[in-house]
Image: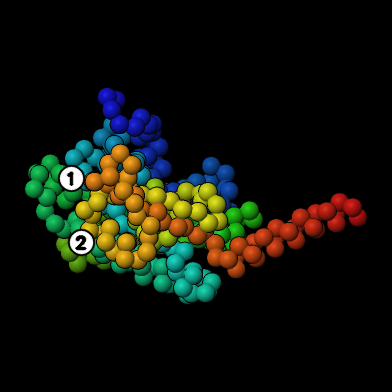
Amino acid sequence: MLNGEPGFAFPENMVRYGRIRMPGQYDAAEATLTASDGFCGPIAGETVSTDAVGGNPCLEQTLESYELCCLVECFPDTHLLAAGGDQTKARVQFERTLRSALLYAKTVTLGPLPWAPSNDVLVKNRRIGVSLSGLQQFIARAGGDGNGLGLEVLRQWCESGYSHLRSTDDELSERFAVARSIKLTSVKPSGTVSLVSGATPGLHWPEAAHYVRRVRMSSDDELLPPLVEAGYHCEPAVGDEKRTTVVTVPVTVLSEQEEAAAAAGAAGTAAGTVAGGTG
């Protein structure tokens, strides 16, 4: 590598395990992992050889040569929040959002590309990456991480959500008279999109319950005036004051009420441990 950030990629794993299911508990043994996408054949993932698979710079999406990313981001935690914790209602809303996200991404693949090699692989694969962000917030709101409850709820949502995406893609592909997408999901590391939405990025763990993140953007970016109007702190970037602006974005993983409840629960657990030890 002559420049850029060095990194590692394992094409064999990317091809074989791009889409897997974990039956039973979230900590099921590796031997129980099975392919959950019959569309991809007996082995989950790509249908091409590993030496033909690369990826985008962040490597959240496998790509063939000349292929472009087509990613769209969803936030499952916002559905739990809007539904007041009613997981059944929130899950229905979440799957409606997934359908809208897939419809948008699939529509993007219908536009012809000016470069023939890229257009050819686009038409062949119709690859899409419907991504999830704010996952740690979702886990916390859905039951917590330490006891595994929130992670199990996330697993269930992901499984049913993927099934919904696949059936939706079948429907849309037939309607548009194009090939079914060889891949539908991804998890972006995320950046500006999650910051603006107030979500933790992708699967990343938060640094604290409340913190700020900063993003650099071009000073002539169309997104900047709305951020200034909304009250976000914006300032010139040191060393590039004329061309780059730094925007400070506050992030809250838990509301004040949820944070208090979590603290009370932790205190109760600690008290119970002390009482048990002295009894």
- Is 112 left or right of 43, judged from the image as shown? left
Query: Residue at left 32%, top 45%?
Result: 237
Query: Residue at left 47%, top 57%?
Result: 251
- Rendered view: 266 above or below 50: below
Q: Nearer the viewer, residue 136 or 209?
A: 209
Q: Are marks 2 and 1 in contact (CB under 8 Å)?
A: no
Q: What residue would you read off at disc 2?
A: 107
- Rendered view: 83 above or below 62: below
Tell me which corner region of the image, top left, top right, bottom left or bottom right, holds residue 270.
bottom right
Q: What residue would you read off at disc 1?
A: 121
Give residue 137's position: percent from left, percent from top: 51, 59
Q: Given the current orientation, which residue lies at the most extreme right position?
A: 279
Instruction: Residue type at mark 1: give it.
Output: Val
Question: Distance between the Cα atoms at labels 2 and 1?
Answer: 16 Å
Give residue 147's position: percent from left, percent from top: 64, 56
- Rendered view: 79 above or below 48: below
Q: Nearer the viewer, mark 2 or mark 1?
A: 2
Query: Residue at left 34%, top 55%?
Result: 234
